[in-house]
Image: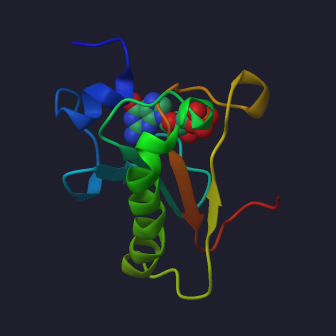
Amino acid sequence: MTDCIFCEIAAGRIPTDKVYEDDRVLAFRDINPKAAVHLLVIPRQHVASLDELDGSHDELIAHLVRVLPRLARDQGLETGYRTIINTGAGGGQEVFHLHAHLMGGSDLPGF
Ligand code: DGP
């Protein structure tokens, strides 16, 4: 066990509603959805936040970003979607394992 909940999810030690996975990233439904579709997309590798990134993460982050539109299409979000990455306590980040929120659907709140 680690003290990172998303590492535990990535390792399969905590069950979650997974919608996509490959060797580098994982996508699952947010436990507290703010829209009809609300996914979290995480790297398998533990990276606390955008603030931790350096050049060694470039391919991983490019891959994670490229997965987002594919997931949006798979979720039927033909008219568009919102992506958010909260960074640091002041940015509203609650889980310190880098994740992109992918949100869309009928009840997408105002921004
Ligand atoms: P953020 O504020 O950007 O750190 O968002 C963290 C999100 O993670 C928040 O919307 C709720 C979600 N979350 C926290 N714990 C769990 C969990 O154990 N499972 C799932 N599926 N989502 C979680």
Where 76 sits versus 84, above or below? Answer: below
Where residue 38 sits: x, y (%)?
Answer: 51, 57
Residue depicted at x 66% and y 67%: 107
- Its colouring scheme is rainbow
The reply to whether residue 77 is visible in this rendering is: yes
> Residue furthest toward the right?
111
Where residue 54 sits: x, y (%)?
Answer: 52, 38
Residue depicted at x 38% and y 51%: 60
Residue 35, located in which quarter of the rendered image?
Answer: bottom right
Quarter of the figure with the C terminus: bottom right
Count the numbered circles shown.
0
Where 32 sits versus 14, above or below? Answer: below
Taking depth in this image into account, of 28 and 57 the one nearest to the observer is 57
Where residue 104 sits: x, y (%)?
Answer: 59, 69
Q: Is residue 30 left or right of residue 94?
A: left
Residue 31, located in which quarter of the rendered image?
Answer: top left
Q: Is residue 93 left or right of residue 52?
A: right
The reply to whether residue 30 is visible in this rendering is: no
Residue depicted at x 28% and y 41%: 16
Residue 4, located in which quarter of the rendered image?
Answer: top left
Where 99 sits versus 90, above or below? Answer: below
Where 81 sits versus 93, above or below? Answer: below
Taking depth in this image into account, of 27 and 75 the one nearest to the observer is 27
Where residue 1 sits: x, y (%)?
Answer: 21, 12
Residue depicted at x 28% and y 13%: 2
> Residue furthest toward the front?
55
